[in-house]
Image: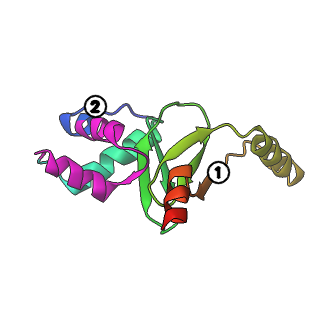
Amino acid sequence: MAVRRNTWQREAVREALERSEGFISAQALHTELHRTGSPIGLATVYRALADLSTEGEADSLQSPEGEAIYRSCATMDHHHHLICRQCGTTAEIEATEVEAWASRVAAEHGFTEARHVVDIFGLCADCTAAAARA
């Protein structure tokens, strides 16, 4: 894998992503960067997010609506997420049962070097309580 230069644009995207709570789309991150005065282009934000994701510095997943969303990665180790559909709050979780199941199912079908992504979408405690009050 080629090492990418650390440009001011890439650093701006990395810092904005670190300030974001939960997952955020490239367009929303671009809007936030422009709100704070950055002249960075949307295509550059997409490129920087893709690079950060490839290098393990950002998590990337598809929202229930089908949009690619990103967040700063707290750990570069393999992990899974619980994600609130309402507010985007995210928790990194270990899922040893999922790991064992994925390895077993792959082996049963003759697969090796299997990789997987598990993200669980639901409502966090705060959003559940707010919905109950409404």
Q: CA distance from mark 1 to mark 2?
A: 31 Å
Q: Residue at x 45, y 53 (%)?
A: 88
Q: Name which residue type carries label 1.
A: Val
Q: Is residue 21 above or below residue 134?
A: above
Where is residue 41? Give x, y as percent: 18, 53
Residue at which label 2 appears: 5
Where is residue 98? Give x, y as percent: 76, 45
Comparing 91 with 70, the one in front is 91
How many numbered discs? 2
Crowdedness near tag 1: few (<14), some (14–19) or many (≥20) residues, C-alpha within 10 Å: some
Question: In the picture provided, is 73 more to the left or to the right than 51?
Answer: right
**Which span is picked out in magenta?**
12-38
Question: In the picture provided, is 94 more to the left or to the right than 31?
Answer: right
Residue at which label 1 appears: 118
Helix, strand or loop for the magenta stretch, by majority: helix
**Is residue 84 highlighted in magenta?**
no
Q: Residue at x 62, y 54 (%)?
A: 120
Q: Nearer the viewer, mark 1 or mark 2?
A: 1
| Secondary element at image label 1 | loop
**Is tag 1's residue or tag 2's residue first in the polypeptide sequence?**
2
Where is residue 12? Give x, y as percent: 23, 37
Q: Is residue 82 above or below residue 18?
A: below
- Asked if residue 40 shows in the view, the reply is no
**Is residue 24 highlighted in magenta?**
yes
Question: In the picture provided, is 78 more to the left or to the right than 112?
Answer: left
